Image: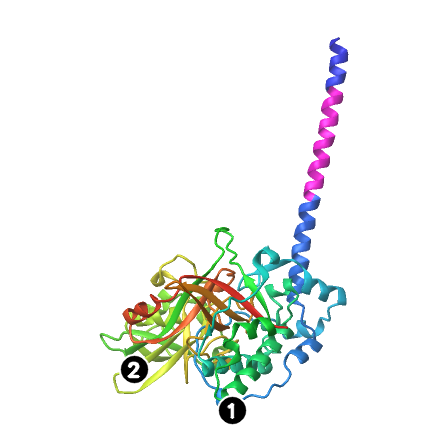
Amino acid sequence: MSIIFSQKLRLTVGIAASLLVGLTASHLYNQNKNQKIAQQSQNIDNNFISNQQLNNFTTTTSFSPTSLQSTAVNTNFWQTDQEQVNQYNPSKSEQNLAATSISYPIIDEWRKYKYSVNGNQVLSAAQLPTNKVNFNQSDLLSVLVNTRKYFQEHGKADPDILRPGLLSTQKVTTEDILKTLDFMIEVLQEDIAKNRITRLQNPNFINRHFRVIRWNAYKPDNPNQKQLRITKYAVFTHPGTRKKTSTYNTPIYSLKDNTATDKFYTRYTKQDVLSGIYEPGGKEYGKVAPLAYLTRNGLEEALMQGTILINFLDGSKGFFNVDRNNGMSYIRGLKATAQKRYWYFRQVDAIKGYGYKIDAKISIKPGVTFAGDVLNIGLGRVVIIENTQSGRRQLQMGVIADTGGAFLPNLYQLDYLAGIFPNQKSFRQYIGKLPEYANAYFLVKK
């Protein structure tokens, strides 16, 4: 009995061991296969734009000469090797996969894969509620024109903007986005010329001529959040001086032109800069140009908002916009004074938004501009947010024409450019009337 039992036991153990090895091998194979699929999907998306598409996307559009003005904030943090884009010609099957794949790979500002998201869980077909859409007609036209002009003039130098983005899971291409901008520009120019309320404020007109795509927030650590968080940013006015004083003792600096090859500034944190390394007697004195001196609070607001309007004590004034940073990541949840990221500024003629370099940035207007995840959502996406105030539905239209460190990546938030304010108190009073969360819709020309 014991011998038979022992043989049966050995046989049973052998079969169990074989099953265990087989299951383990199958799991490892599937895991490896899934990782390869995610990587392939990312590579296809990153290389989606061919030379022919670049030429098609940047076709000339006629612009009203009066509409090339405006205001805005932050910067682009990456740049793809243009030779790689020019050499790659995707096959038809790869183009179809990029356009129709439900799973979309999300990347961060350093182009590293973070996670994949099911597009159908985030985006869905919808109809706009039958309420008037609010926006300033001339301001929206200005931002639409400036954004379209950026595609036209900088699409080859900044191929990031030609990524199809999350909307590709709904078969929306970058060309569809440009057609949307072109159509809206045409409608607004015609309506403004005829001195009438634009048709773009009529929800029936929008539902007839546009695909309306509902955007449900996607936040990995809070899957219950469905509405978008609507934060607000602004440009603040601050007093300042051209030279350091006891009160205005915190500098903003500009990088000199010869620093394009010398990346010395990437070695220093914000705390290093504020310790005086660029001031007389500092070890890097003379390598950067001081633009102005503010209070420490003024500097932190300039860094946070991306633009500051300085009223100098000599009676002059000027806008200053972030140009390049030291390459250190912004850390969410860390207080502003402890952040290591530091921005160098340039003086500009207005508020500036998205752009791969300082003299290419989009001019934007308050009230019709959102900052968002340009890399994963996309530049130039027209968004309507919906909320309820005093029991009535409110619809507000704007364009994603700006970005920032908080949006890399971010599929659950937009930052609304509220305006220019003299202080935090007036800013807080104004935004207290605005929604913290809202339903959101993309508009894409049919």
Query: Residue at the location (56% across, 83% down)?
Result: 187
Magenta span contains residue 18: yes
Crowding around mark 1 (Cα neighbors within 10 Å: few <14, some 14 to 19, many 20+) is few
141 lies left or right of 177: left
Identified at 46% across, 83% down, the residue is: 138
Q: Nearer the viewer, residue 119 or 81?
A: 119
Tag nearer the camera, 1 or 2: 1
| Rendered image quadrant of residue 174 | bottom right
Q: Magenta residues, as a range?
A: 10-28
Residue assigned mark 1: 65
Tag 1, which secondary structure? helix
* Residue 430 magenta: no
The answer to whether residue 446 shows anywhere in this view is yes
Look at label 1 and name its amino acid. Answer: Pro
Which residue is at the front of the view, 99 or 439?
A: 439
Q: Main secondary structure of the magenta part?
A: helix
State the mark number for residue 311. 2
Which kind of residue does numbered mark 2 sit on? Asn
Coloring scheme used = rainbow
Q: Which mark is residue 250?
A: none
Please say whether residue 159 is visible from this viewpoint. no
- Circle 2 packing at 10 Å, graded few (<14), some (14-19), many (20+), is some
Q: Residue furthest left?
A: 246
